[in-house]
Image (tube, rainbow, N blue to C red):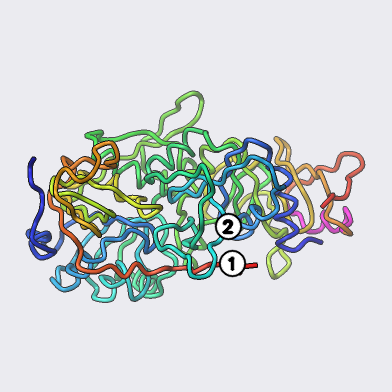
Amino acid sequence: MINRTVKGVEEALEGVKSDMTLMVGGFGLSGIPENSIAQLVKSGVKNLTCISNNAGVDDFGLGLLLQGKQIKKMISSYVGENDEFERQMLSGELEVDLIPQGTLAERCRAAQSGIPAFFTPAGYGTEVAEGKEMRNFKGKPHILEHAFNADFAFVKAWKGDEAGNLIFKGTARNFNPVMCGAATITVAEVEELVPAGELDPNEIHIPGIFVKRIFQGEKYEKRIEQRTVRKRE
Amino acid sequence: MLDKIGIAKRIAQEVKNGYYVNLGIGIPTLVANYVPDGMEVEFQSENGVLGMGAFPFEGEEDADVINAGKQTITTLPGASFFDSATSFGMIRGQHVDLTILGAMEVAENGDIANWKIPGKMVKGMGGAMDLVASAENIIVAMMHTNRAGASKLLRKCSLPLTGVNCINKVVTNLAVLEVTDTGFKLLERAPGVSIEEIKNATEGNLIIDGEIPEMNI
């Protein structure tokens, strides 16, 4: 067994510097690496480029890094629900690259899997396609999209073991698996870290080879963005 | 004239037994409530779940189980969770039978705009561009006109496009229309709505062929 554990969030973030490109897992506030984000805020690193489907809300998730003006550029598919984000974008303080969600996921997976680029139909005929190479397949236009290039990937899983193997829960899985191994260093934080051998190899979602550092998060708030319920009859 | 629930009810009639369906945010989400009991249908949410059920009972919300609108949901027997690349593999690979989404504008050639108002609204496209570029069966749920009364069914979209030549059908508060090579073909009128009213509310080319029945909802 190759042990991937680090002592805690401080060791996990060793080497993160200003001007780096970071992948950050999660969809909305679900499955975000809460502890790593808190440590990024604390570290004060600046001029970050963040690849993440969303930008959090004003006071949670990546919104915390926006509050401190630590992000120079966001690469996302959807950034509603965040007033500070909108303000920084409209004032030109924040650079924003909006790309289709499936393309975002695939550009992560391509980086993970050693595929430099791929063709997708998403965005054909729209401003997303501007300046990109185009080719027809089966009579349908596709655009060339490239794998991401990132320094760190921060992901969050439900359970993990010392070998870095990960299991996700529910829709908190989202972008986390495709970001594993998609950056130079992948840092996984988990709710529960167990010794190697305790997780059933049949149930591993992401093998530890894609994860460089793993630690158990100190606490998880797991905030709900839209609490929707129905009445008991 | 229909309200949002009426539009959802009419679209629910387009859902067939055995369909995997992706529902967008807004009116499309309501469609799930009006699919007949006993019909075998699975709802996909692009953040990574197939087999979505109703909202949870109070106290049973799980931050790890949400839909694409970030709302807490439940799952039904047979449900599955998956990552974002797999989710869009389902969509791009045309494994999803029906896509229902909202729009700000639809053009007579099937173009759709629903993600950006330059200088005003910059929320992003989310999964909409992937959906409209790949899905074969797309129904748009929308109001026929904006608040100022201007048509949203146009000759040409004025807003930045989400996809080109991709919409098959539009269900509005006034009508059901099919997008054809020559324009919007009027299929049904909403209860109490005249052909004249639909004509006045449609800027794009409107094709009226024979008797136009009233919707049955």
User: What is the secondary structure assignment of the residue under circle 1?
Assistant: loop
Q: Residue B10 location in percent, x, y?
A: 75, 51
Q: Is residue B199 a member of the stretch shown in magenta?
A: yes
Instruction: State whether residue A4 is above or below residue A47.
Output: above
Residue A165 location, quadrant = top left
Q: Which label is found at residue B99?
A: none
Write the residue at 52% across / 34% down.
B95
In this view, the residue in front, A224 or B128, is: A224
Looking at the image, residue A46 sits to the left or right of residue A143; the answer is left
Density class for disc 1 (Cα within 10 Å; few <14, some 14-19, many ≥20) is few
Of all chains, the one bearing label 1 is A
Instruction: Name the residue carrying label 1.
Output: A230
Q: Residue B90 location in percent, x, y?
A: 47, 37
From which residue to which does the magenta span run? B193-203
Density class for disc 2 (Cα within 10 Å; few <14, some 14-19, many ≥20) is some
Instruction: Name the residue carrying label 2.
Output: B54
Task: Give the spatial CA distance, label 1 vs label 2.
Answer: 8 Å
Q: Residue B56 location in percent, x, y?
A: 53, 62
Q: Amino acid at mark 1?
A: Arg
Q: In which quadrant will I find the N terminus of chain A?
A: top left
Same chain, marks 1 and 2? no
Write the residue at 49% across / 47% down.
B129
Write the residue at 31% across / 50% down.
A168
In this view, the residue in front, B9 or B122, is: B9
Tag 1–tag 2 contact (CB < 8 Å) = yes
Q: Residue A71 location in percent, x, y?
A: 24, 66
Q: Amino acid at mark 2?
A: Ala
